[in-house]
């Protein structure tokens, strides 16, 4: 789906001249945990899920459920990005594994799907953003960049989250892996993004927090990159990048 909000921003003559001379016209921006506080919002939803399904009958504390959930979720999303597991497998398995810790090996696929549906509904309406996300996207829009979401997230959830956090109208195009038929970091995903947005590699900058799917995928596709390293004390970029930031407000000094 291509979404193009009406541009009402008026730039000063100085800003117009800066736009003519700058290198980038288009920005590909990851959504989850780059702009949208996916982890924080999901933590809230997981606690709501724990209460709703009365999981205290099987676990001594919420953390005995949530910690295995996050271990499974991170692993499965990495496998999904590499094309090693399907969407349907991820949806079931990321709950089967943590639920089995407390409920045993008899957790059914039907129950996992029920839990997953409830969880996705709870997540989709959470408004939490990464600190500085609104300020950064407001600034980038005012500067006249064409902004494009590029995400591996599920179609039915991403649009609701974009509306819930108030950023939907900030973007010219929303490019999702389910529409592309392939995930980041695949070259085919970025080829689809270029066709959909009309952007070109030399004039496009990728901004994202995942070094494999966002950064290495974009670099292989010929894009310059901004690595949003939210936890530099825990992770160091294993290869050179054009820019590395630790807070979104740093985009205001780059662009």
Image (cartoon, rainbow, N blue to C red):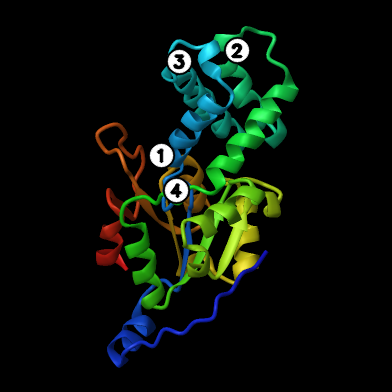
Say few, some or many: other residues with alpha carbon within 10 Å of mark 3 (under 14 / 14 to 19 / 20 or more): some
Say which residue label 1 marks: 40
Say few, some or many: other residues with alpha carbon within 10 Å of mark 4 (under 14 / 14 to 19 / 20 or more): many
- Mark 4–mark 3 Cα distance, whole angstroms, equals 33 Å
Residue 68: percent from left, percent from top: 49, 19
- Mark 4–mark 1 Cα distance, whole angstroms, equals 22 Å
**In this picture, residue 234 sits left or right of residue 96:** left
Lower position in the chain sequence, tag 4 or tag 3: 3
Lower position in the chain sequence, tag 1 or tag 3: 1
* Disc 1, SS: helix
Image-quadrant location for residue 133: bottom left
Lower position in the chain sequence, tag 4 or tag 2: 2
What residue sits 36% from the left and 41% below the top? 239
Lower position in the chain sequence, tag 1 or tag 2: 1
Tag shown at residue 215:
4
Q: Nearer the viewer, residue 134 or 29?
A: 134
Are circles 2 and 3 on residues that touch, CB within 8 Å? no
Instruction: Identify the residue at the far bottom of this view.
Output: 13
Residue 204: percent from left, percent from top: 47, 66
Q: Is residue 154 depicted above or below 134 in this figure?
A: above
- Mark 1–mark 3 Cα distance, whole angstroms, equals 18 Å
Q: Is residue 29 depicted above or below 114 in this figure?
A: below
Q: Nearer the viewer, residue 201 or 138?
A: 138
- Mark 2–mark 3 Cα distance, whole angstroms, equals 11 Å
- Mark 1–mark 2 Cα distance, whole angstroms, equals 24 Å
What residue sits 65% from the left and 50% below the top? 155
Say few, some or many: other residues with alpha carbon within 10 Å of mark 2 (under 14 / 14 to 19 / 20 or more): some
Tag shown at residue 100:
2
Lower position in the chain sequence, tag 2 or tag 3: 3
Tag shown at residue 64:
3
* Disc 3, SS: helix
| Labels 4, 2: front one | 2
């Amino acid at each position: 789906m291509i979404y193009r909000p009406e541009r009402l921003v008026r730039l000063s003559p100085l800003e117009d001249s800066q736009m003519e001379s700058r290198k980038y016209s288009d920005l590909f921006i990851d959504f989850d945990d780059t702009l949208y506080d996916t982890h924080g919002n999901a933590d809230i939803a997981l606690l709501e899920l724990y209460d709703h399904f009365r999981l205290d009958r099987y676990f001594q504390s919420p953390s005995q459920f949530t910690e295995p959930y996050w271990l499974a979720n991170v692993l499965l999303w990495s496998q999904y990005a590499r094309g090693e597991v399907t969407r349907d497998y991820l949806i079931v398995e990321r709950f089967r594994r943590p639920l089995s810790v407390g409920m045993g090996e008899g957790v059914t696929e039907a129950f996992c799907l029920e839990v997953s549906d409830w969880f996705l509904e709870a997540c989709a309406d959470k408004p939490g953003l990464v600190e500085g996300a609104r300020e950064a996207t407001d600034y980038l829009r005012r500067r006249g960049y064409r902004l494009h979401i590029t995400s591996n997230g599920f179609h039915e959830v991403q649009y609701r989250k974009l509306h819930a956090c108030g950023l939907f109208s900030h973007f010219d195009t929303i490019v999702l892996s389910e529409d592309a038929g392939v995930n980041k970091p695949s070259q085919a995903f970025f080829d689809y993004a270029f066709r959909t947005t009309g952007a070109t590699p030399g004039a496009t900058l990728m901004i994202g927090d995942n070094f494999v799917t966002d950064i290495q995928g974009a670099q292989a596709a010929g894009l310059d990159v901004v690595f949003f390293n939210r936890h530099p004390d825990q992770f160091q970029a294993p290869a050179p990048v054009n820019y590395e930031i630790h807070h979104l407000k740093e985009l205001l000094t780059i662009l």
